[in-house]
Image: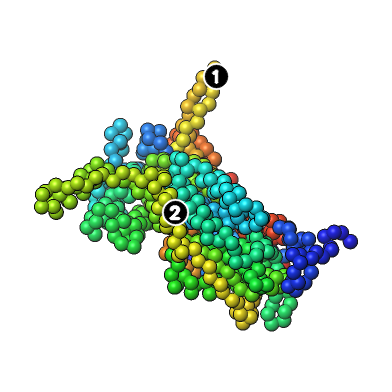
Amino acid sequence: MSDDDLPLVRLGQGDYRRDIYPHDLTRQPRPTTMKNVLTYSALNTFRNCPRKYKHRYLDHLRRPERPDALAFGSVVHGALELWYRQPVDMPTVTRLYRVFDYIDAQFSQREGDEKQKHQWHVARAMFAAYVDRYEQEEFEVVEVEKEFQAEIRNPETNRLSQTFTIAGKADGIVRVGGKLYLLEHKTASAITSDYLDRLWTDTQIALYSHYLRELGYPIVGVIYNVLLKTRLKQKAGETKQEFEARRAELAAKNKSGRSTAKQQLPETDEEFRARLHGWYSQHSAFHRERIYLSDDRMAMLQDEVWEITQQYLDAKRRSKWLLNTSNCFSFQRPCEYLPYCQSGFSPNLRDNLFEVAAPHEELVELTVGGNSAADDDFDF
Amino acid sequence: MPLALPTTRTKPSADLSTKTTLIYGPPKIGKSSFASRFPNALFFECEPGLNELEVFKVPTYNWPDFLAACKLVAAGNHDFKTIVIDTADNAFKYCSEFVCGKHSVEYEGDLGHGKGWALVKNEWHRVLTRLASLPGGLVLISHAVDKTVETRTGEYTKTQPSLPDRARHVVLGLVDMILYCDTITRKDAEGNPVVERIIRTKPHPTYEAGDRTGRLPESLPLNFDAFSKAFATPSSKPSK
């Protein structure tokens, strides 16, 4: 028997439903299966538009450009991961400066790139204020960026899928009052009632909770850790012409026909940082929302996952990948594959606008052992 | 003659005057000269620069003139086999100005909710699709521009037609060939550098190019005779 086969006792807690083995603590999955790996992202893509699924997960097409939202969001995500990975007994300042180093490295072109410089300012201000707010956390961190791979079951017979396993990566697992919660980081531009309502319909997190429960983590709910992205911009100042126009306008309103207005100069970095600091000092700049998950919802999701896999197998068998035109403009922006679909799938467009990149990039390590659902001819 | 079912498959057309082609490259490399050699070419002149070439041309310095020229071509009764839009960049600019003028705005963005951009793109798409569906060939000429692509792991420079993205996507989806006119420097027998003008025909991460016909080699001299000869050669590999 190797060391890997011996169960470990973790954290001195007894709230796991099974023994925890060394491979549960590493990023390496249990080397069990050559089944095809599905992620939530793949499932959701297939559900929304089978044709998009084909482009991304079968043909491996991806736009090479990094989306802006992803760029900022991923930096914040990385910063939070680093923050929570560091030992809590380390001095806060040391931990914070390590995070600042990380943020600085992500925006290495900031001196010559105004967009990077802006995002760098915002990310630093956001994180400094975040640490100020949550220096004493309400929870104990159990796992950070926890990758998992679990079996998909037929909810009627409880038999395992012969074709698929599901994989994912949770931002964190934390303990509050002896109970485990999934920690999910979000960056948002505003927290509205719609936004908060939408958290209740967040299928991805509910699904993660379900499969993590199966793996022995008794997740009772989700803590959404929402960080607001400010809309503040560094003021560019006004040009001579703009100033003259404004002064003339003010002078015209004045009985004396004169104005004492001064030309607005560009905002310095220090001034902008001070403004950001003020903005992020507001209580509303961060929000924590705790949501509990019902067993009924979990059962429904399990059913949905199974159904989607069956529909996927059917589409694959018949090589029919329907285009869902209702989804071409979801989130008020065109789908990245829209020009390709509109062109009738012109190879010229495919070859010039897209690169070939392996799917499930968020799960590189997990997909090493198994196969991506995209890659193989399935034996049905 | 009674209708009969076919007994053989149709062969892919090797006739250049049935193809839609995008030619782009840096200024003065010879894009227009190259396009002027296409079969019975008629230029829609959208920017000056054809004075040194002996070609048939219609001045189309605004969108109504452009549409009028399209109408004349569509009506038939002429010997032209290829329409050359020189340049597509300016044609798109006229299209945009026309749509903006029609809606009494200065820029597409002045119409709310992205409506302006959509109207311009639709007009561009409508006219190009109609032109491409006419019996003759269609050649679009564009300038080249270097664009920095910021990827998830770094950045690199890509050369592409200078058309705005929304116009470029329509064109890329429409054309059979994307020919990128480029230069390479070789050394001659005495070791002196010699600049050669070439056409690149296959996609690459650092430039846009393509060949749906599958007839062209990866690169060939920027010379119509060489191009025509390569195109007439039976395809070794079927296009994807």
Is A141 situated above or below B69?
below
Q: Residue furthest right?
A: A1
**Residue drawn 51% across and 36% down?**
B220
Q: Quadrant of residue A137?
A: bottom right
Marked residue chain, label 1: B
**Residue highlighted by disc 2:** A277
Looking at the rendered structure, the kind of residue marked 1 is Gly
Left or right side of A153 for B222: left
Of A183 and A344, nearer the camera is A183
Marked residue chain, label 2: A
Please determine if labels 2 and 1 lie on a single subunit: no
Looking at the rendered structure, the kind of residue marked 2 is His
Which disc is residue A47 wearing? none
SS of the residue under disc 1: loop
Q: Report, in whole angstroms, how far the alpha carbon at label 2 lies from the one at label 1.
A: 63 Å
**Residue highlighted by disc 1:** B191
Is B140 situated above or below A204?
above
Of A332 and B228, nearer the camera is A332
**Residue drawn 60% across and 66% down?**
A138
